[in-house]
Every structure is written in structure tokens, then in C-alpha cells.
Image (tube, rainbow, N blue to C red):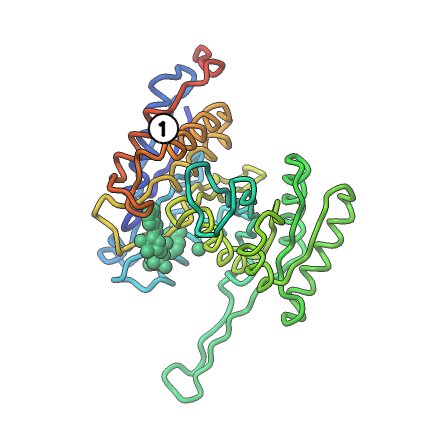
Amino acid sequence: MKKIAVIPGDGVGPEVVRESRKVLDHIASVDPAIEFGFEEFPWSAESYLKSGEMMPPDGLDMLSSFDALLFGAIGSPLVADHITLRELLLRIRGGFDQYVNLRPVRLLEGIESPLVGVTTADIDMIFVREGTEGEYAGVGARLYPGSDREVALQTAVFSRHGMERVIRWAFELATREGRSVTSVSKGNALNYSAVFWDQVFDEVAAQYPTVPTQRLLVDAAAMFMVMDPKRFGVVVASNLFADILTDLGAAIMGGMGFAPSANLNPERTFPSMFEPIHGSAPDIAGQGKANPIGSLWSTSMMLDHLGYPQWGDALMKAIERVMAQQCVRTPDLGGQSSTEEMGDAVLAALEAPPASLTPKL
Ligand code: NAI
Ligand code: MG
């Protein structure tokens, strides 16, 4: 049995996670070789307002024995965003050493990109975002608060260890998939951290002489994602830069509702976490309007990670089929369908891979 910790979170988080749960329950019911044990953790801005904490002090211990974490989204207008993000999501990413934040940016057949004249072949890149340090290391201080001498310091952390392992992971991915690697940084202005990043990138790249590479400044990378997206294969970047660029990625692949992510601890010392990249979307929460595809796509990545790639693949194909048919569309796609109807459509399109129906041991 695979143990899955479910953290639905706030806003549309619970709405999209419900659709993922439905698909996982279905897979377990039709495949005798698969069993999931779910435990739900109601940690959210809402629970913070009652308890004063985003997760209990031993929250990471509570999660550490799970095979994977399924996360919705976190954030509420009632609680400061730095509390919800830092004290839950970033604590998990950092505490479980999830240093590979994998974020595919791919235009699906049947979805219209806001970019004119692009096809599915033009938008197919995979971001490898560093997930544990960089600009989000949480190092800094506020000095002399409330006085006219008030100062804020926010220190980015770029370690050789941290950069090397994530850049190497990106090259391994590129080698497996026959892709190029683009490094995004800002070495002209960030003369310590980004120059170091560029240096480590070049060192690792030299060990993969057959992989085509390019180095871009982050501002130029943003421009090229709009003007020439097909130049990107695998993209590796620090925490902040890839956070920003993947919202742009979500936009060019059709909207925030699509974009999936996996927070991987590649050594599997700790559980990895799967979540759509969007936030809690308070503007549409509670109305059944959220597009669940980002969550379902992340679930497909979770199935791959758990050792069920045939099901991960089947779920991805179901998502692609529903998108290509263009019948069921949530409001972000110009339609009237609900979150649940979209989830049901993907479930109906899900075809069991016969090879996976092996007897339970
Ligand atoms: P957001 O991603 O929640 O929303 C941005 C826009 O995208 C909104 O117009 C929203 O309606 C739309 N959108 C998001 N998800 C959608 C979906 N599944 N289907 C259709 N449309 C969707 O980002 P925003 O508004 O900047 O932040 C809202 C809250 O979420 C804040 O509290 C923020 O801190 C938090 N947040 C949490 C994240 C996480 O849990 N991983 C990531 C980003 C933001
Ligand atoms: Mg983001």
C-alpha cells in the first residue's frame, strides 16, 4: 500500500484536490496491484486562525513516513501570505530537501495559447527549479522596525552543493529526454550569487558535452518565452527566477489552472510533494470554477514517482483526450463546466493500461 498525505489547503485547493482523489480512488479500485492509504491534514490559513500555527511543531515528523504528499494550494486574504507560504509550504520543501521543483510547461492539443501562431510543438519545456535555497532561503532581518531607520535584509543563499545537484539533475533529465539545457540567471547584476551559479553551470555542463546548452539572463529568458518559446528544452534556474517564469509558462500553456509541479527529493530520503503551481485563487474559490487540470497533471507525475508510470501515462493521455475534444471547459477556458465536471470527464476518458493489472502480492 502507498501512503498518501493529502493537504488540500485553502480556497480552490480542496476543490481541485478532490478531483485528484477521485482519480486515485478509481485507479485503486480497478487495479488489484494498487492500494492507496490516504490521510488528510487540514492545515490551512483557516486552521491557523484557530490554532495560531500553520502546522504542528512536529508536522514534518507526521508526514515523514508517507510515500508522497498531495498538496492543493495555500493562502487567504485573512492571513499574511508570508506566514502561510513560509510556515507550511516552504517548511515542507526545505525540511524534506525537495530540491528539484519540476514544472512542465507544455501546450496541449485543443488549448489555445495567448501567443499567436504557436503550435503544441513550440511550447514544450520542463523547468527544473531549485526548491530549497536561493532567494527563498528565508535568511534576513528587519532592523529598527517602526523607526525611520527601518531596514530589511533578505539574503539569497547559493551553495555549491545546492546548485551542483539541481543542475546535474537537469542535465540527467535532458540526457534522458534528448533535450537542451538552458540556464537562467542574472550574472550581470548579481555579481556574487549569479556569477557563482553561472560558473557551476559551466562546470557541470562540461561533463555533458553532447547536451546543447544556452545561458540566458532572466529578463531575456522572459522575452524569449513569449517571442521564441521553442528554443527551450530543460530550463534550470534558482527558486525566485523559476517561480516567476513558470507563471509566465502557465500563461502561455493556456492559464494558471493547467500548470503542474512535483517537488522531488530525488534520493527518496523524504517524501516528495505534488501540487498545481497556482495559488488558492480566492477570486473564484467556492464556486466550482477552478480548472482541476493542474492538480490532475501533478497527480500523473505522482503516479510516475510512486512506480506506476503506466498509470501516470494513462492519466496524462486522458487529460490530453479531454482537452483535444474541447467539449468540457471550465470558465478559464471560456466554458461553463464545473471543476467536478472536468474531473469527471478526465475520469471517463481514463483507460486502464492492461499491463498494470497484475495480481496483488
Ligand atoms: P493564484 O494562482 O491563486 O491566482 C492567480 C489567477 O489565476 C487568479 O485570477 C485565479 O483565479 C487564477 N487561477 C488560479 N488557479 C486557477 C485554477 N485552478 N483554475 C482557474 N483559474 C485559476 O495567485 P494569487 O492570486 O497571486 O494568490 C492567491 C493566494 O494564493 C495568495 O494568498 C498567495 O499567497 C497564494 N499562493 C499560494 C501558492 C501555493 O499554495 N503553492 C502559490 C501561489 C500563490
Ligand atoms: Mg509561484
The relative height of residue 156 versus residue 237 in the rendered view (above or below) is below
- Give residue 38's quadrant in the image: top left
Residue 74 visible from this viewpoint = no
Residue type at tag 1: Leu
Identify the residue at image location x=45%, y=50%: 250
Residue 300: x, y in percent? 44, 33
Residue 311: x, y in percent? 45, 24
**Of 203 and 49, which appears nearest the observer?**
203
Residue 218 visible from this viewpoint = yes
- For the N terminus, which image quadrant? top left
How many marks overall? 1
Residue 237: x, y in percent? 59, 55
Q: Quadrant of ligand 2?
A: bottom left
Residue at which label 1 appears:
24
Under circle 1, the secondary element is helix
Q: Is mark 1 within 8 Å of ligand 1?
A: no
Identify the residue at image location x=44%, y=52%: 114
Q: Residues within 10 Å of mark 1 (few under 14, many from 20)?
A: many
Residue lying farthest front? Answer: 117
- Give residue 66's quadrant in the image: top left
Q: Is residue 233 left or right of residue 53?
A: right
